[in-house]
Image (cartoon, grey):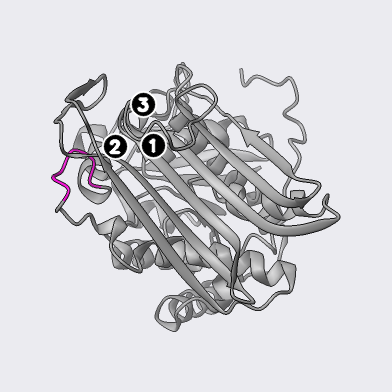
């Protein structure tokens, strides 16, 4: 069994506790939290497992890493604290741990990552013998291995398009939805996540990763952006009121340009209410889905709907993203220390989990 730590118990961390507990090759060794109110609470309660696991949450990072866990699922956010996240992950790697995380998106395509991010990780690997695999939470597999797999089914491939289509009122992270994305703010508000070059900073690595796998050279990466205002005031179950005239929907693309044309595209279409931008694509159930479209011959379209935590589509997306990361741990534990990406780490079947419910 591989002793595994879950670091953080937000949207990603809750799913990680469940995934580690369900994996037959892993054992939950510790849960690290930042909120003092969570210290001492059982991991089963924090993870929504439905039973106690006998692992009390702690904020003592030094003690947890001193125990030399073999693996760490780093689930703390890196969106607004990337330097702190990099420092945390470096500590875990130097302690000899295999680390999997969605928190450092510049490392999705680790070979072309900025030296100021890549070099500290490689130094930590050399010093401590740990490893790092970064994959997205939106979910990463929907923007790398799934489209690449499906592209291989086509005779002619013109465009690879990855879509996330979501009602953001189901995403229980209000600060991100309102302030990072800008939902409910006046249309002249400039959300950080929608600022010029930021979408490329977040998703450009996956564009480059797919280009590398397809053996094509990118001319450049471009962005498109469209925002729509709410025509009427709406009230959501999770986040309260969003006023008429404020931002209610966003649609953007990060485009990999090949020979002057957008050929590899990651597109996000998000709303705070279905009444906003009704002419844009909508998910089949009105809540959320991830879609891969291969334009070519034949035209191939794959739509993935995942739900978790009372049929919550956002939680389902988190859970599948976490599943990809947690399922990689035993492979990484057997591999040599290093920095890995989605083209290095194979998709793992659910060995030992078919029909199995943890006791």
Q: Position of residue 241 (x, y in %)?
A: 16, 26
Label 3 – label 2 distance at C-alpha: 19 Å
Q: Which mark is residue 11?
A: 1
Q: Which mark is residue 61?
A: none
**In which quadrant will I find the N terminus?**
top right
- In the figure, residue 232 lies in which quadrant? top left
Q: Residue at x 69, y 40 (%)?
A: 301
Q: Which residue is mark 3?
A: 274
**What stretch of residues is rendered in magenta?**
182-187
> Mark 2, mark 1: which one is toward the viewer?
2
Q: Residue at x 48, y 46 (%)?
A: 138
Q: Is residue 281 left or right of residue 212?
A: left
Secondary structure character of the magenta stretch overall: loop
Whether residue 340 is visible, yes or no, is no
Q: Residue at x 57, y 54 (%)?
A: 70
Q: Is residue 184 left or right of residue 217?
A: left
Image position of 6 with respect to 40: above or below? below
Label 2 – label 1 distance at C-alpha: 8 Å
Tag 2 near tag 1, CB within 8 Å: yes
């Amino acid at each position: 069994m591989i002793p595994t730590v879950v670091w953080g118990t937000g949207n990603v961390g809750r799913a990680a506790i469940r995934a580690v507990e369900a994996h037959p090759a892993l054992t939950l060794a510790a849960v690290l939290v930042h909120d003092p109110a969570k210290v001492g609470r059982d991991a089963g309660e924090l993870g929504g497992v439905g039973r106690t696991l006998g692992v009390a949450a702690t904020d003592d990072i030094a003690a947890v890493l001193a125990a030399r866990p073999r693996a760490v699922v780093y689930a703390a956010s890196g969106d607004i604290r990337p330097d702190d996240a990099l420092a945390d992950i470096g500590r875990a790697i130097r302690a000899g741990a295999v680390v999997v995380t969605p928190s450092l998106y510049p490392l999705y395509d680790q070979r072309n990552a900025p030296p100021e991010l890549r070099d500290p990780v490689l130094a930590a690997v050399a010093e401590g013998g740990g490893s790092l695999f970064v994959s997205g939470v939106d979910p990463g597999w929907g923007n790398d291995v799934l489209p690449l797999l499906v592209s291989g089914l086509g005779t002619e491939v013109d465009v690879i398009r990855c879509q996330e289509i979501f009602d953001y009122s189901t995403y229980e992270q209000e600060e991100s939805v309102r302030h990072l994305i800008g939902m409910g703010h006046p249309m002249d508000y400039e959300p950080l996540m929608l600022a010029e070059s930021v979408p490329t900073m977040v998703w450009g690595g996956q564009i480059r990763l797919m280009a590398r796998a397809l053996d094509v050279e990118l001319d450049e990466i471009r962005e498109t952006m469209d925002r729509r205002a709410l025509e009427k005031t709406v009230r959501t179950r999770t986040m309260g009121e969003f006023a008429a005239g404020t931002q209610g929907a966003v649609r953007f693309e990060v485009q990999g340009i090949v020979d002057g044309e957008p050929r590899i595209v990651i597109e996000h279409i998000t709303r705070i209410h279905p009444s906003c931008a009704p002419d844009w694509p909508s998910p089949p159930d009105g809540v959320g889905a991830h879609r891969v479209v291969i334009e070519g011959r034949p035209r191939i379209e794959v739509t993935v709907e995942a739900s978790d935590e009372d049929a919550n589509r956002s939680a389902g997306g988190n859970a599948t993203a976490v599943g990809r990361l947690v399922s990689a741990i035993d492979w990484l534990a057997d591999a040599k220390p290093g920095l890995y990406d989605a083209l290095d780490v194979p998709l793992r079947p659910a060995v030992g989990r078919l029909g199995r419910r943890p006791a």
